[in-house]
């Protein structure tokens, strides 16, 4: 079944103490306001274990994972390390990982596969840069990102995927995609998935929008039939703003 999801990507923000306080506020609100919306937070690796302990109604995600199982990979964090601290989700392919750390489609395909094998639910990010949208190749860019990382999956594996469409030009810029632009791309993605995995998996897929989503624009973005929620950066760092976005449903 398709789920409405609001996930907060804290990026490299908050000390452990600040992170626990933020997670505690979000958990408290979610526990007092039962709804069909699944709320997820993705703190830095160092916070996962302690933040996880205060979450009972909110899902725990990492922001990344290693493409390798274990061994001599200094500084990396494996999927089994993540599941050992009760993370249930892993953001994979965020544009900052792609552009700053050179993560290619091939690396991301490995990460998706390895995360699924460990029982993690990948939140797979895709999206075009401004130049690509201005050149009118944004659909091709997103198609390639999805084909390379997700079309290798079996239908059973794909049934555990969440996709986040995040136009790079909208991330952290204050300029969000218009509701029409978001709907157009989400519909395109769902059709692409339908062509590969069939109607049932395409219909069940949750596709989140990410990019300068805030309480003031979340409602109009989430009102679209193919926008099933949001991956939230900056606005997930203040409980009040994050909760305002959850309330947009
Ligand atoms: C993100 O980085 O995933 C994101 C959506 O950031 P922001 O909400 O700050 O644009």
Image (cartoon, rainbow, N blue to C red):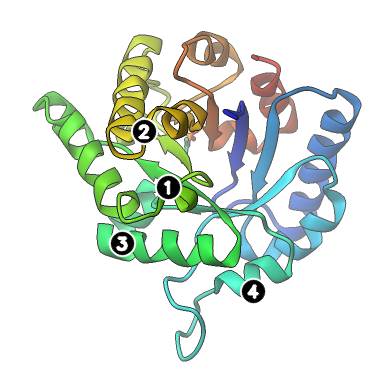
Q: Measure how far apart labels 3 and 4 are at the Cα level.
A: 21 Å
Answer above or below: position of 78 versus 53.
Answer: below
Name which quarter of the figure residue 239 lies in: top right
Looking at the picture, tell me which residue is in the foreground, 99 or 37.
37
Residue neighbourhood size for the residue with mark 1, other residues' Cα within 10 Å, grouped as few (<14), some (14–19), many (≥20): few
> Alpha-carbon neighbours of circle 2 within 10 Å: few (<14), some, or many (≥20)?
some
Q: Earlier in the sequence, mark 1 or mark 2?
A: 1
Q: What residue is at 25 percent from the left and 46 percent from the top? A: 147
Q: CA distance from mark 1 to mark 2?
A: 9 Å
Q: Position of residue 197 (x, y in %)?
A: 36, 39
Residue nearest the viewer, comparing 36 with 90: 36
Q: Which quadrant would residue 191 be assigned to in this image?
A: top left
SS class of the residue under badge 4?
A: helix
Ligand 1 within 8 angstroms of badge 2 C-beta: no
Instruction: Please report whichever mark, 3 or 1, sits nearer to the chain's N-terminal start.
Output: 3
Of labels 3 and 4, the one closer to you: 4
> Which residue position is annotated with label 4?
81
Secondary structure under the numbered disc 1 in the rendered image? helix
Q: Secondary structure at mark 2?
A: loop
| Residue receiving disc 2 | 198
Residue found farthest to the bottom: 72
The x, y position of residue 53, in whole percent, is 85, 57
Tag 3 secondary structure? loop
Where is mark 3, residue-wise?
103
């Amino acid at each position: 079944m398709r789920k409405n999801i609001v996930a907060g990507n804290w990026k490299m923000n908050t000390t452990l103490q600040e992170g626990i306080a933020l997670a505690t506020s979000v958990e408290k609100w979610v526990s007092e306001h039962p709804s069909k919306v699944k709320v997820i937070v993705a703190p830095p690796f160092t916070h996962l274990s302690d933040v996880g302990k205060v979450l009972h109604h909110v899902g725990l995600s990492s922001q990344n994972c290693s493409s390798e199982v274990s061994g001599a990979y200094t500084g990396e964090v494996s999927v089994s390390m993540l599941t050992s601290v009760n993370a249930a989700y892993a953001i994979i392919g965020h544009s900052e990982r792609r552009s700053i750390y050179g993560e290619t489609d091939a690396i991301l395909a490995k990460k998706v596969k390895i995360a699924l094998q460990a029982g993690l639910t990948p939140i797979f990010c895709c999206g075009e840069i401004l130049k690509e949208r201005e050149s009118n190749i944004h659909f091709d860019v997103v198609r390639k990102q999805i084909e390379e990382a997700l079309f290798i999956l079996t239908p059973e594996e794909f049934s555990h995927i969440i996709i986040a469409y995040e136009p790079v030009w909208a991330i952290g810029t204050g300029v969000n995609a218009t509701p029409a632009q978001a709907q157009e791309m989400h519909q395109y993605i769902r059709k692409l998935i339908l062509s590969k995995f069939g109607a049932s998996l395409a219909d069940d897929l949750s596709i989140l929008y990410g990019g300068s989503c805030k309480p003031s624009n979340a409602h109009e973005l989430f009102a679209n039939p193919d926008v099933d929620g949001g991956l939230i950066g900056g606005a997930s760092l203040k409980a009040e703003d994050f909760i305002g976005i959850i309330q947009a449903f």
